[in-house]
Image: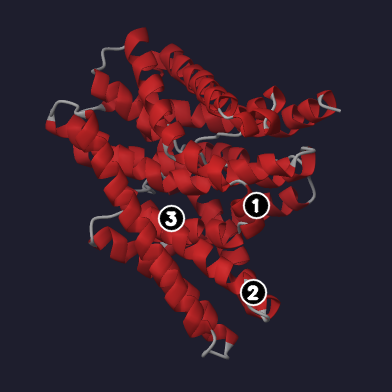
């Protein structure tokens, strides 16, 4: 991919996001994805490709940090219990139930670990434009907070779980529950600790840096530095970036000059985020045509349907298990949160990572998984607004 490709993709993204500013329910990721699929048929974009390293090392740290930094601390405090349970216990249950369902349906020959691997790739949620739509269309602000918070945290925990399962899959080792959970907890805790420490250190340095440009530079160092250090130490870089953004935001909230500190930071990161998203979703569309095989299109639809059913079952079980949440989250809320669990950036990054490590030996698994991701983006994203509006009217 050369500079000309980048500038053209950015300009296309500018047009799409400009249209989005004038619409209430314009599904930006879906439109960018469809344009990307169209571009894949043009000779000019045929050599363009997106890799796991490109997503993980360039795009993800900035996107994760921005999401965490912009997430309202008040919403995080209020829904910390729900977000924490959904991103750990909910994640594990979803992978186990979805993997088992895919394996037992068995329309394509897959090992149980292979089915779990598909489930692990499909579990991360990525509601890029969904959160803003939910805030406009739903009567309940807690729904948007839970959807955004769950996505923010489970991006990290899902990578850890995927790493454990993919190692078992590629090495043909037998699945052992206790060591896998132990690795999951260790890598997750390590990433969180690094992000918290670095976020706190940078927040203290802010008080000695009076130039706003340098504070922006510090935030870039924090977003990428915490990620790379954590990955170098063998723990979760994703959770490090997330926790560093949350820590910085929390510390800024406690200062008298919060608005002053945030002015430059917001201006910078609010430009970076849509720029990255434009390039990323267009590239996902271009890359999709290299992996998809329409031979198993029926099973792809089944996997997509199973992912929604399993997510609804897991959310219902968690929300109805605790008395407090049983009263807070009604059936309508559970339905909206289920539908808002759209697959996206993280799922594609994990899939491309698997493709690089498996050396093209798992084309069927890759095709099934990529197909389910694209169906999620194409079907779920456009319907979030009408469904949330409908449920909001029903609850009045």
Q: Is residue 226 above or below residue 385?
A: below
369 lies left or right of 18: left
Q: Which residue is mark 2?
A: 262
Q: Residues within 10 Å of mark 2 (few under 14, many from 20)?
A: some
View extreme (front): residue: 323
Q: Position of residue 280 (x, y in %)?
A: 48, 50
Q: Is residue 353 visible?
A: no
**Under tag 3, what secondary structure?**
helix
Q: Which residue is mark 3?
A: 60
**Under tag 1, what secondary structure?**
helix
Residue at (31% x, 12% y) in the render? 108
Which comes sooner in the sequence, label 2 or label 3? 3
Which comes sooner in the sequence, label 1 or label 3? 3
Q: Position of residue 386 (x, y in %)?
A: 76, 29
Q: Which residue is mark 1?
A: 75
Q: Residues within 10 Å of mark 1 (few under 14, many from 20)?
A: some
Q: Position of residue 166 (x, y in %)?
A: 24, 35
């Amino acid at each position: 991919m050369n500079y000309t490709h980048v500038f053209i993709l950015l300009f296309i993204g500018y047009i799409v996001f400009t249209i989005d500013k004038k619409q209430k329910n314009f599904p930006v990721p879906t439109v960018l994805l469809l344009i990307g699929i169209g571009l894949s048929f043009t000779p000019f974009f045929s050599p363009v490709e997106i890799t796991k390293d490109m997503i993980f090392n360039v795009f993800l740290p900035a996107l994760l940090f921005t999401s965490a930094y912009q997430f309202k601390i008040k919403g995080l405090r209020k829904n910390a219990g729900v977000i924490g349970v959904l991103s750990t216990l909910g994640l594990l249950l979803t992978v186990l139930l979805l993997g088992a369902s895919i394996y037992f349906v068995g329309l394509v020959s897959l090992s149980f670990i292979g089915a779990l691997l598909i489930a692990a790739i499909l579990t991360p949620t990525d509601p890029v434009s969904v959160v803003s739509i939910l805030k406009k269309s739903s009567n309940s602000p807690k729904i948007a907070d839970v959807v955004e918070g769950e996505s923010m945290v489970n991006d990290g925990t899902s990578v850890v779980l995927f790493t454990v399962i993919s190692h078992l899959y590629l090495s043909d080792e037998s699945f052992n529950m206790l060591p896998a959970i132990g690795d999951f907890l260790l890598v997750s805790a390590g990433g969180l600790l690094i992000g918290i420490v670095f976020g706190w250190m940078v927040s203290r340095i802010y008080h000695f840096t009076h130039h706003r440009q340098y504070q922006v530079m510090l935030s870039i160092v924090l977003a990428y530095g915490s990620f790379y250090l954590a990955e170098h130490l063998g723990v979760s870089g994703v959770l490090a970036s997330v926790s560093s953004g949350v820590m910085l935001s929390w510390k800024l909230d406690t200062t008298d000059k919060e608005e002053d500190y945030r002015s430059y930071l917001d201006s910078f990161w609010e430009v970076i985020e849509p720029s990255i998203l434009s390039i990323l979703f267009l590239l996902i569309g271009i890359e999709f045509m290299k992996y998809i095989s329409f031979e198993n299109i029926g099973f792809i639809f089944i996997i997509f349907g199973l992912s929604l059913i399993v997510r609804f079952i897991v959310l219902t079980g968690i929300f109805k298990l605790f008395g407090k949440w049983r009263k807070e989250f009604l059936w309508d809320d559970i339905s909206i949160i289920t539908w808002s669990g759209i697959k996206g950036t993280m799922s594609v990054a994990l899939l491309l990572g698997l493709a690089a490590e498996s050396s093209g030996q798992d084309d069927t698994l890759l095709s099934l998984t990529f197909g389910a991701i694209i169906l999620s983006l194409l079907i779920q994203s456009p319907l979030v607004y009408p469904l949330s509006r409908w449920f909001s009217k029903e609850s009045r």
